[in-house]
Amino acid sequence: MAVGVARFDEDHKELFSHLSEIERALELRAFDDADRICRSLLALGAQHTAEEEAFLRGIGYPGVVTVLQAHQALQTECRRLQELINQKSEEAGAFVAALNGVLVSYLLRSDINFKSFVQELRDLGRLK
């Protein structure tokens, strides 16, 4: 599911890694650890969104609004996860497991769509 922009591909791997770490913390009922990791996840998501938006606007990608909507929806889900963690809810574990699927869906619905646009710009020599 690589999009061809190294820093974004690394961010995506890190997002999945954070979700796995949260899931492990919840299995151990380490809610404070899960909260700390979730805060890091939210910060990474916000930074990733800002950088990806700037990049896409900079290269003139016409679907930037769709990408941003997907980012916003994912951030909303991550904030819901944080609420469940803070409530020490038994639902948090199942929610984080489902969030992995949401992240895959986000990548397939939005980010993967700009991969061919980026590649075309590279092929034309307009992007390195």
Image (cartoon, rainbow, N blue to C red):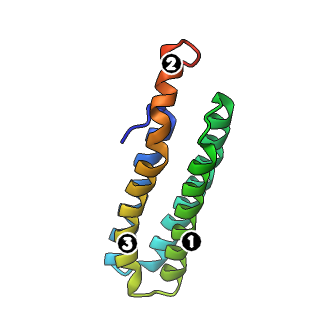
Residue matched to label 2: 122
The x, y position of residue 95, in whole percent, is 40, 75
The x, y position of residue 49, in whole percent, is 61, 49
Q: Secondary structure at mark 3?
A: helix
Q: Secondary structure at mark 1?
A: helix
Q: Residue at x 58, y 50 (%)?
A: 66
Q: Crowding at label 3, few (<14), some or many (≥20) Cα neighbours within 10 Å?
A: some
In screen coordinates, is 99 left or right of 122?
A: left
Type of the residue with mark 2:
Arg
Q: Crowding at label 2, few (<14), some or many (≥20) Cα neighbours within 10 Å?
A: few
Q: Which mark is residue 25?
A: 3
Type of the residue with mark 1:
Arg
Residue matched to label 1: 79
Counting residues from the N terminus, which is met first, the one under dot 2 or under dot 1?
A: 1
55 over 110 or under it: above or below = above
The quadrant in which residue 18 appears is bottom left
For the residues marked 3 and 2, what is the alpha-carbon distance in whole angstroms? 41 Å
For the image shown, how many numbered marks are present on the structure? Answer: 3
Counting residues from the N terminus, which is met first, the one under dot 3 or under dot 2?
A: 3
- Circles 2 and 1, Cβ within 8 Å, touching? The answer is no
In screen coordinates, is 89 left or right of 101?
A: right
